[in-house]
Amino acid sequence: MLRCTSTIIILNSVIGALFYGYSTYGTKLISSGGGLLSSGVKGIYYSGNELAVIVVIISLAWFKSPAVRGVDDLLRIGVLISGIAIMTKVAVISCGLLLVVLAAEKIRRFRTFGDLFILFAIVVALYYGVSAFGVRAYERFLFFSDKGDIALAALSGRLERWLEMLNDQTILTVFIGVNNIQHPLNLESDFLDMYANFGLIGLMILSLPILRLIMHSGDRVLTFTAVYVFCVSFLSGHVFYYAGPAFTLYLVHRAVR
């Protein structure tokens, strides 16, 4: 299962970068000059955050596999490099931290030339990924700081929409949400999106599966993965109730049982 899903993620990034795929920021095709490092690459996926969380779920599952070597090792690092290439905050921070953990593991178990190659690839991926992301983050910081609001920079402009939603609350919307199918609210935070559109009742119903998985998974890696998805959903959109992460988490859950 991990080999198949990892290969799909890597091929999505390669095909997206070289032939047909969209940049993470903007609507340009990468192959037509959308810019790989500056704009990120998400291939055929609609949401960069959705793809980033899928990458992290798969990568955490790889850490559960004992003594990963050879082709499996290349697949594991290839998935994380594909995650770095997405260039969202969720992708770069999460995959960057996992690459550091992987590098530490390789140093601790250093044996062959292949380990040296993996370490070199990790260093290159971290350098170019963090550098490109840092430039974009600095540009956003300058843009929002000129407006006098650093919180906007940290939350990618979401704060204004969150406050506007909270100010428009009524007793009815608190419990059942706005329920506007044609024009649903998009607050770029899955839990606030669910609360705003479906109210507290809908939020509790939709949250039950992930909470049940956290409490009853019976596996530390799977529990940590579910907690990660739960926490990321508070600050990011297109994660919790999108098909990709949910289906991938289900596959990992079935694989470790």
Image (cartoon, grey):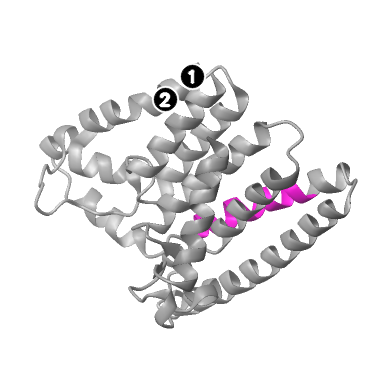
The disc at residue 211 is: 2
The disc at residue 253 is: none
Closer to us: 152 or 197 = 197
Closer to us: 165 or 1 = 1
Tell me the SS state at disc 2: helix
The disc at residue 215 is: 1
Left-right relation of 215 to 170: right
Magenta residues: mostly which secondary structure?
Answer: helix
Q: Position of residue 6 (x, y in %)?
A: 55, 46
Label 2 neighbourhood size at 10 Å, few (<14), some (14-19), many (20+)?
Answer: some
Q: Position of residue 45 (x, y in %)?
A: 37, 57
Amino acid beneath label 2: Leu
84 lies above or below 144? above
Closer to us: 3 or 119 = 3
Look at the image and give the residue range highlighted in magenta: 88-103
Instruction: State the residue at coordinates (25%, 39%).
Output: 195
Q: Does the segment drawn in magenta span residue 74?
A: no
Tell me the SS state at disc 1: helix
Label 1 neighbourhood size at 10 Å, few (<14), some (14-19), many (20+)?
Answer: few
43 lies above or below 94? below
The picture quadrant where one finds residue 202 is top left
Instruction: State the residue at coordinates (41%, 65%).
Output: 152
Q: What is the distance, in whole Å, between disc 1 and disc 2 at their CAs?
A: 6 Å
Q: Where is residue 98 in the image (x, y as percent from the top left)?
A: 66, 48
Residue 86 visible? The answer is no
Instruction: State the residue at coordinates (66%, 31%).
Output: 64
Q: Where is residue 183 in the image (x, y as percent from the top left)?
A: 12, 54
Cβ atoms at labels 1 and 2 below 8 Å apart? yes
Left-right relation of 120 to 210: right
Amino acid beneath label 1: Met
Which quadrant, please, contains the C terminus?
Answer: top right
Instruction: State the residue at coordinates (60%, 43%).
Output: 59
